[in-house]
Amino acid sequence: MPKFVTIGYGDQAGYERTEAGVRDAAHEHDARLRREGVEMGRAGRPVQVRNHDAAGVSTEEGPFLSSTLPVAGFAVIEAATLAEAVDIVSRTPCAVAQGVVEVWPLEE
């Protein structure tokens, strides 16, 4: 089955503006996905890694890309189609709590 990488963006202010019942349902949705074997987690501090021309590794703390909302978490999901993947992530905390979720198809 096709796999998709999802990246959730959201902040505490948006989370707090969302009705508690909606948030609770979204967390239960994520808990069900975890029970079904979906790999997901919250985002920690990123590190950029470079090894240009395989001449030596250099690292830099912090994200390479920036957005108006911080990265909140990641998941790798399986879905038959992109539409199904969108449906799955549309009920997650970032999607319902004033954030956004990107869905990236993993291509072989």
Image (cartoon, grey):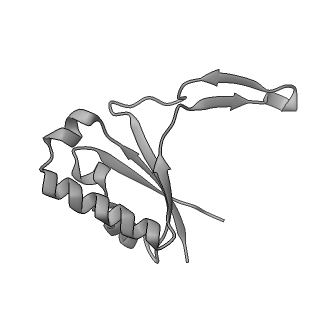
Question: Which residue does the image show at 21% across and 54% down from the upper left?
Answer: 23
Question: Which residue does the image show at 31% across and 47% down from the upper left?
Answer: 100
User: Quadrant location of the C terminus?
Assistant: bottom right
Question: Which residue does the image show at 14% across and 57% down from the upper left?
Answer: 21
Above or below for 104 versus 44: below
Above or below for 59 versus 10: above
Q: Is residue 96 left or right of residue 79?
A: left
Dividing the picture into quarters, in which one does residue 52 lie? top right
- Judging depth in this view, the residue of 81 and 30 nearest the camera is 30
Q: Is residue 108 left or right of residue 16?
A: right
Percent from the top left, x then y, of residue 63? Answer: 53, 29
Marker count (numbered): 0
Percent from the top left, x then y, of residue 41? Answer: 48, 51
User: Quadrant location of the N terminus?
Assistant: bottom right
Percent from the top left, x then y, of residue 38? Answer: 49, 66
Q: Is residue 92 left or right of residue 13?
A: right
Above or below for 10 versus 36: above
What is the residue that sits farthest to the right in this orientation? 55
Question: Which residue does the image show at 61% across and 63% down from the upper left?
Answer: 107
Percent from the top left, x then y, of residue 59? Answer: 70, 24
Dividing the picture into quarters, in which one does residue 51 lie? top right
Q: Is residue 34 left or right of residue 23?
A: right
